Image (cartoon, helix red, strand yellow):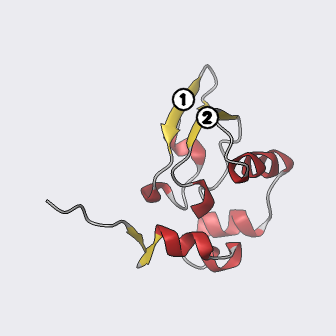
Amino acid sequence: MVQKEFKYRGKTIAELKTFTLNEFMELIPSRSRRSLQRGFTDDQKILLEKFRQNKKNIKTHSRDMIVIPEMVDHMVKVYDGKQFNEFLITGEMLGHFLGEFSLT
């Protein structure tokens, strides 16, 4: 059985990773797009730098961070108010907030 390759709005993950942030923003829903247009907060910039450095055990309190293509295939721990919930970021999570996957 052949597994179907994941595509987000007709683009593969490899194609999405080559996109600039502005090109990716054109593909995501308006609520997420508006959040990204405002820019990243200081906490979100620190989190994004950890992803770019391919660090292990990434922990964050930034539940309002939008999942972007460079985060795909990384393990992340998101705080839910009591503990850190660990999960793997997949292509299906693109454009969603990290807090949606770590319920309070």
- Where is residue 4? Give x, y as percent: 26, 65
Q: Tell me if 19 is positioned left or right of 40 in this view.
A: left
The quadrant of the picture occupied by the N terminus is bottom left
Crowding at label 1, few (<14), some or many (≥20) Cα neighbours within 10 Å?
A: some
Q: Secondary structure at mark 2?
A: strand
Q: Position of residue 47 (x, y in %)?
A: 74, 46
Residue at x 52%, y 44% (from the top left corner): 100
Q: CA distance from mark 1 to mark 2?
A: 5 Å
| Left or right of 23, for residue 91 | left
> Would you name the residue on which mark 1 appears?
85
> Which kind of residue does numbered mark 2 sit on?
Val
To which residue does mark 2 refer? 78
What amino acid is found at the position of numbered circle 1 in the picture? Asn
Q: Is residue 102 above or below residue 2?
A: above
In the figure, 104 relative to 90: above or below? above
Q: Is residue 28 visible?
A: no
